[in-house]
Amino acid sequence: MNTNKIVLHSTIFFYLLILIVTTLPFFISINSIAIILLVINWLIEGNWKKKREMFLSSKYAIFCVIFYLYHIIGLFYSANNSVGLFELEKKLALIIFPLVFATSVTLNRKKIFIILYCFVTACFAAVVICLSNAIYFSSIGDNSYFFYHKLGSPIHFHAVYFSVYLGFAICILIYFLQDKWETQSWTLKTMLIFLVTLFLFFLLLLSSKTVSISVLIITLLYLLVIMYKRKKIIIGILFFVLVPTLSVIMVKSSGNIQNRFNELSKENYFEVLKLDDYRGFQFTGGTIRVAIWKSVFEILNEEKAWIFGVGTGDSQDLLTKKYMQKNIYPGDGALGHIGFIDYNAHNQYFQFLITLGVSGLFIFFFLLSYPIIHNPNNVLQILFIFIFCTFCFTESALCAHKGVVFYSFFNSLFFFGSYNKENKEQN
């Protein structure tokens, strides 16, 4: 292939990745257009013989494609094909990014870090917009915009998804901070520390219980590893004081945040497990999930679908039917209450279990664990996977654009980038 053509397509590839990562917290439509342009650039680039060789040499890319094909097979034993086709459309990123990254020019460490800086910058912009909106509403007497879903409402960002983005951004910032601590200017160090503090503050305002707690634990464990392996005592002490202190102060000083976290000790999970009729039951964020997960297992038993699931298109119909049978709150149109009838499994592991069965869930576990086994020294990918795995416990993360693109993009970026190869060679 002509050298100029290779350089042109590689440059377009890189800048489209930047566009994808910077629009991810904001605009689904622009983000989708950027992904389409990425695919078009990849197709026009040609060089199919080399692409075929690169793809066949990557076991991980092959398994990513197999996993998507497994969803297509699930469509054949689904009754609701329209929903199944929509699910395939939503999950296209699961095959696009591994395929494009595995068969394109490998990104070097510098370009990967530029992409990560762009992601952090986008998260910072999102935080500034949301805080500005909350301050405005506070000035007219409404403080509710400083909390939970209303906080992310200016950019239509679900609080849990926003929390995951910020949790990963915090890990990126700490990695940058410790990577070349001795050679960094104090201006850069101060800026990075400020951003970590701001993101932690905002994370607690979002009040996503599972994600917030898991991010704090993962962050502190990462700091322990840094102190042990890199002898970065100053960074460790700084954040071991900063993270817990800021967390306790925030939770104690805000009634809304404290009430959210107090729910963990007050939720009656055993009562939910005992009941078969939930008429009049007052659900919380935790108890509704337990009721849904119980329904998932009942459906799998009734449909005898433990091995292959109920199919790509039928899980939601069966869940909704089960909710109606159990009188799980359907909402109240007159009062403007949405209810829980259209809720998915709210757990990505159970979502794959009901959709594709144990076999599909096994493939998903393999895709999550293989990068860690393949290169246990790829710190950023490991941190990313840990955060994403905790995210999957309370949300069907791969059923929404901001979840599936987030996972597939960064997972592919780390696995197929030269950062992965360099880390493996250095250790």
Image (cartoon, rainbow, N blue to C red):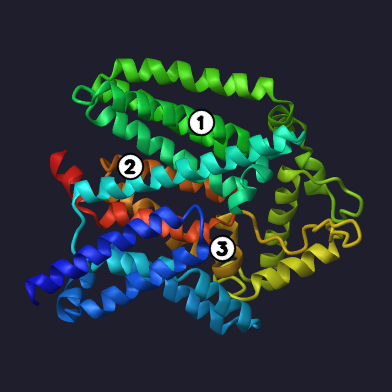
Determine which residue is flagged by label 2: 380
Which mark's residue is nearer the viewer, 2 or 1?
1
The residue at the point 23 percent across, 54 percent down is 417
Say which quarter of the image contains residue 201.
top right
Q: Which residue is mark 1?
A: 200
Distance CA(mark 2)–CA(mark 1): 18 Å
Counting from the top left corner in percent of width and height, residue 121 is at 40, 43
Determine contact: label 1, label 3, CB under 8 Å: no
Image vertical order of residue 63 relative to residue 170, above or below:
below
Q: Residue 275: where, in percent of width, then height?
A: 85, 50
Pick the quarter of the image with the N terminus.
Answer: bottom left
User: What is the CA distance from the residue labelled 2 to the residue labelled 3?
Assistant: 24 Å
Asked which secondary structure carries label 1, the reply is: helix
Query: Residue tagged by mark 3?
Result: 399
Q: Is residue 48 above or below residue 307?
A: below
Q: Secondary structure at mark 3?
A: helix
Seen from the viewer's position, the closer of residues 53 and 365 is 53
Mark 2 or 3, nearer chain start: 2
Residue at 72%, 66% (x, y): give it: 319
Instruction: Name the residue nearer the viewer: 171 or 147.
Output: 147
Label 2 amino acid?
Leu
> Above or below — where is 346 with respect to 198?
below
Q: CA distance from mark 1 to mark 3?
A: 26 Å
Can you tell which mark lies on residue 358? none
Secondary structure state at the residue bearing disc 2 = helix
